Image (spheres, rainbow, N blue to C red):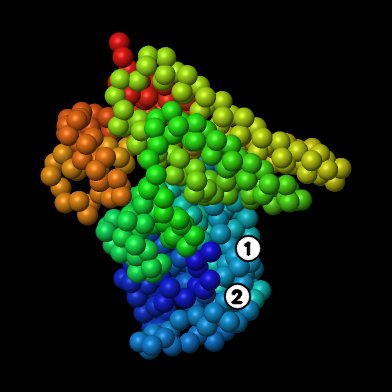
Amino acid sequence: MLRKTNNFSDILLQENPSDVLRRSFEGGRIAQTYLFAGKASVGRMAVAKAFSALLQCKSPIKDENGRLDSCGKCEDCKRIISNSHPDVKLITPNGNEIKIDQIRELQDIAVLKPTLGNWQIFIIDPAEKLNQSSSNALLKTLEEAPAHSLFILLASDTGAVLPTVLSRSEIVRFNSPSHQQVREILQNKFNMKPEAAAACYALSEGNFGQALSMAEDYEYDPEVFTIKRAHTTYLLQLQMFAQLIENDFSSVNTLEKAVNKAWQLQTMTYQPLLEARKQLCRSLAMNTGLPKAFPLMFSQEIINTIDSASAFIRKSLDPMLSESKKSYPSAVIKDIETQISAATDKWGSDQIEKLFICLMNLYTDAMLMAANAEETLLLNLDRKEDIITIARVEGFALLRSRIEMLEKSINLLRRYIQPLLILENVITQIGGAEA
Ligand SMILES: [Zn+2]
C-alpha cells in the first residue's frame, strides 16, 4: 500500500483543505463537526486520517515549513495508520444505508472519555448514506456531544446533509483535480512514463485514490484484443477475481470479520479485470454491426458468470457461519447472512455498473474530441487514436444520446430492475446489431 503514514506532507493535491485544518489546530480553533465536501476518492479520507492523527498525536512535530504534523511514531499515530485506534471510529453504510442503530451506538460512545487519545473522533463516510432517522439521531448527538468528541462527515457536497446538521458544521472544501494533474502526479511520484501513467489512470475510470494504489505495481501492456477475445478474457478475469476473493474469505473466522470483509468487496479491485473490462468496452465501442444473436448471448454469459461468482463468494463463508451457529443466537446469524448476501449481490451488480461507467467514459471522451476539446481533458488519453475514431464515426449528437442511455441504464440497475435486460439493451444499442 502507498500510504504508510498519516502525515499531511503525504497528502496529494489537497493543500487548501489541509492548510485550513492545520491552521485551525495551530490556532486552537477546532470545530466539533467538520463537513468535508468533495468528490469521492479525491483524498477526503486521507485528510480525515491526517487530521485525526494530528489531533490524537502525543508529540506533534514541525515540518520543513514550520507547520505542525503528527509524529507518525507514537502509539496513537501507529494505531491510526493500522486503522485500530480505539478513539477514531469509522462509520460506513451497513448495507445501502447508515442505519439509526449505528448512530445510536456512536451516541453511546461519544459521551465516554477517550481511552487512548485526546479526542473521541467519528468519521462518517459518506454522509449521503444517512437516512432520515439516522440523520435526525446524528443531529441530536451533535447537539448533546461533550467537548472531547469530534465528528468528520465526508460528503460529495453540502446539499448532502440536513440543513440543521450543515449549520453546525465547519465546511472544508476539497479540490477536484483535473485528469492532467492526476497523470502528472502518477508520473512524478511513481516514475511512470507518460503513456503508462495515462493507461493506469484510465483503468481507474478517473478514480484518483484507486489510480494511486494501483500505480505502485502497475505493469504497462499496450496489447489490443479482438471483441471475441476481449469478451472471453473479461469472463475469465471475472472468475479469477471471484477466486481471489474466495481465497481471501477462507481465512475469515469470526462473524464480525465476515461482515466487514463482505462490505469491503465494494472497494476491492483486481488490475487484470480492470484491463479486461477496458478492452471489452473499447471493442464494443469500436465495433459496429455485431451479429444479431450476439447481445443476448453475450449478456447472458456475463450475468451467469457474475451470479456464479457471487454464489461462490457467499459459499466460502458457509463453514464459518455454520460453526458460529453453535455460539450465536439464530437471529444474529440470520441478520449476518442477510448482510453478506446483500454485499455480494451488490458486488455483482457493481460489475455491470462498472462496465457501463467504462463505456460512458469512453463516449464522454469521444464527445469532447467531437467538440474539438483539448486532448489533456481526455480520461482515456492512452486510447487517443480509438477515441478520435469513435468521435469521427459517431458524431456529437449520437455520442450524447449514448451517454444519456447509459446514465438511464445505471439508474435502472441501481433500482434492481432486471440486469440481463438492461445489459442486453445496452449492447444492442451500442453494438449496432445487424437487422
Ligand atoms: Zn504521534
**Can residue 110 be seen in the rendering of this structure?**
no
Q: Nearer the viewer, residue 80 or 212?
A: 212
| Vertical arrangement, residue 273 with respect to residue 17, above or below | above
Residue sitting at the far right: 326
Location of residue 372 (image quadrant): top left
**Rendering coords of residue 87 (x, y %):** 61, 69
**Rendering coords of residue 104 (x, y %):** 60, 53
Amino acid marked by disc 2: Lys
**Rendering coords of residue 169 (x, y %):** 39, 63
* Residue 342 in the figure: left or right of residue 429: right
- Characterize the local packing of mark 2: few (<14), some (14-19) or many (20 or more) Cα atoms within 10 angstroms: some
Location of residue 13 (image quadrant): bottom left
Sooner in the amino-acid sequence: mark 1 or mark 2: 2
**Can residue 53 be seen in the rendering of this structure?**
yes
* Residue in the picture at 71% in, 36% down: 315
Q: Disc 2 on helix, strand or loop?
A: helix
Residue 237's disc is: none
Q: Between marks 1 and 2, how big is the CA–CA gap?
A: 22 Å
Residue 78's disc is: 2
Q: Nearer the viewer, residue 102 or 144?
A: 102
- Characterize the local packing of mark 1: few (<14), some (14-19) or many (20 or more) Cα atoms within 10 angstroms: some
Does the beta carbon at disc 2 come under 8 Å from ligand 1? yes
* Residue in the picture at 78% in, 44% down: 320
For label 1, the residue is 109
